[in-house]
Amino acid sequence: MPPSKLDSLYRRMLITRFFEKGWGKPENLHRVFQFRKIISCRETCFKLVPRDYPVEITKKKTYSDSTLIEGNFTTPLELHMPGVVPEAAQQAHFQLLLPNKWNDEHHKPICIHLAGTGDHFFWRRRNFIAKPLLKDANIGSIILENPFYGLRKPDDQIRSNLHNVSDIFVMGGCLILECLVLLHWCERNGFGPLGITGLSMGGHMASLAATNWPKPLVLVPCLSWSTASAVFTTGVMSQSINWDMLETQYYSDGQYRERLSKMVTIVDDAFTAGQNFIQNFNRSLHELKEDIDDTRKIQSLQCETHNNSVEDGNNSIFLSKSLELNQMDPNREPVPLKDMLDKNVSCNSNLTLIQPDTAERSALTKLMKFILPASSQSKSKKIDITKTNWWEREALQFMRGMMDECTHLKNFSVPFDTSLIIAVCARDDAYVPRDGCSNLEDIWPGAEVRYLDAGHVSAYVLHQKLFRSCIIEAFDRAKKVYEKANYKDLSTAFK
C-alpha cells in the first residue's frame, strides 16, 4: 500500500528541523563508532553497568490507587565516554508508577517506557499508557526521560531539534545503558517480570536496549522497524534535514569522507544482495545455461533462420521453448535472451548472428542484474555532487551508513527470549519505511510482528489501546513461560 498522505502532510506542518549544526564533531563520531562495537555485544555491554549502580529516589507521592516515585542517576555513558554527553543530559530522570496493592506478591511486572520523537517530560506516557496499564493489568511503569528532551534538554536547543547527527547516537547510547541501570534496580527491589516498550523512536530505542539484557525480557516496540536509516533518508523525516548543509560540511572537512565514512557500513545492500542471490541463484543459473544452449542452436541453424525468420517466427527454437516453459509455469518470467534476439532482427528481416562469447556475456550480465539490487550495480559510478536530486548525493549515503552502523538490529545481539517480543507496525508508515530494510522476523526468529492498516500518525493517535493490549499480552506470556519459578529466583539463577 502507498505511504500515508496524512504522515507527509503532518510532517510538512511541523517547523522542526533536525541536525542544523551538522554531523557533529569528528572526534566524537569516531568514539561513538568504536563504542558501538562494545554496546552492541550483550556480553561486553552488560559488564559496563554494575548491579548495584547508584540510583537516588527524590520524591514519593501516594494516591488512592497508586504511588508515584521520582528518581535520578548519572548516565553511565558519561562515565565511559567523558565529554560526549551534554552537561544538561548527564543526569537521567525517571518516574515510577506502582499500584498500591499487587494482585500477586510473587508477580510484580514493571515496564520501562521510552519516549518517541517530541515526547518531552512524563505526562503523555504516564496518562496515556502507564495509568491504563496499572488500572487494567496491575502493571507498574518506569517512565524514563530521553537525553536532549524535557529535563535533559540543553538550553540552546529548541524543542526537539537535535543539533547534530551524532546527538541521536549519544541518545541511543545513553538509553541502552540507562535501561540496564533501571533493570538492575528493579531486580534489587524484587520486581519482575520486566519489560521495555516505546513508540516510534522510543520503540527502536527499546529494541536496542533489550538486546543487552541476558535474561527473559518483555519487548513491545511500536511503530519502529529494523533500522533508523530509512527514517532519515527515505521517510518523510528526511524533508526536515538540511542536506545541502550536511553535504557542504561532509566535503569541507576531510575527516568525514576520508576517515569516518570508512568506519560505517550500509547493512541492507549486502544483506539484500545475499538474500536475492540465495533465493534466485539456482533458477537463474539454470536459465543462463538454457539461454546459452539456445543461442548455440540458433547459430547451427544459420541458413534456415536467415531465410524464414520472419514468416516462420513462431517455429523458432527460442520462441517454441519460451512458449513451452510458459505453459509449464504461467508465472515464469520470459526467457531473457528473447528480447536480445528481437533487437537483432533488422527492418529487412535479416537476423544478425550473435557471437558465442557475446551471448554468454550478455546472459551473464542479465543474470547478475537479476541477482543484485540496483544500488549494487551502480556502485562503480562516481557520485556527482552537482546533481539536484539530494538522494543521489554522497552525504545521504554517509547518513545511511552511519544510521545502519549504530542502529541496525543486525549489528546487535539477539534478545535472550524472542518469544516475548510483540512488534506493532503500521502498513502505510511514511515515517518508518520498511522497503529495502531487513525484516524483524529474519533478524529475531521467534518474534511476532503485527500490522495495523494505518499510517504512522493515525496509528499513534487512534491505536493506543492496541499498543497497551500488546504489552499486557506479552507480560502474560512471560508469566506463563516462567510461572513455574519465582521470578526473583529465576533472576538469581541467570546471574
Image (cartoon, rainbow, N blue to C red):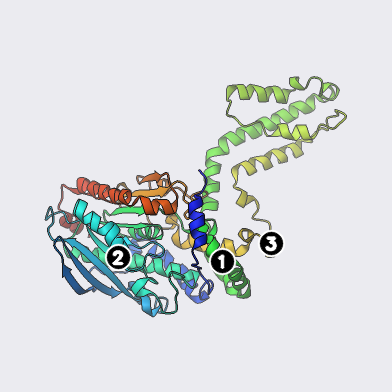
Location of residue 140 with respect to 282 vertically, above or below: below
Instruction: Say what amino acid the circle numbered 3 marks.
Output: Lys
| Residue closer to the observer: 396 or 441 | 396
What residue appears at the point 71 percent right and 28 percent down from the top-left corner? 294
Q: How crowded is mark 3: few (under 14 residues within 10 Å), some or many (20 or more)?
A: few
Q: Residues within 10 Å of mark 2 (few under 14, many from 20)?
A: few
Query: What x and y, as percent, mark residue 271?
Result: 51, 50
Q: Name the residue under label 3.
A: 387
Query: What x and y, as percent, mark residue 446?
Result: 35, 44
Q: How many numbered discs?
A: 3
Q: Earlier in the sequence, mark 1 or mark 2?
A: 2
Q: How crowded is mark 1: few (under 14 residues within 10 Å), some or many (20 or more)?
A: some
- Element at label 3: loop
Residue 261 numbered mark, or none: 1
Q: How far apart are marks 3 and 1 (CA)?
A: 21 Å
- Element at label 2: helix
Examine the image and state in which quarter residue 349 appears.
top right
Q: Can residue 152 be seen in the rendering of this structure?
A: yes
What residue appears at the point 51 percent right and 51 percent down from the top-left corner? 5
Location of residue 300 with respect to 362 vertically, above or below: above
The answer to whether residue 229 is left or right of residue 175 is: right
Q: Name the residue under label 2.
A: 123
- Element at label 1: helix
Report the mark closest to the observer, 1 or 2: 2
Query: What x and y, as percent, mark residue 276?
Result: 55, 43
What residue appears at the point 76 percent right and 27 percent down from the top-left corner? 298
Instruction: Say what amino acid the circle numbered 1 marks.
Output: Ser
Location of residue 470 with respect to 237 vertically, above or below: above
| Residue closer to the observer: 230 or 295 | 230
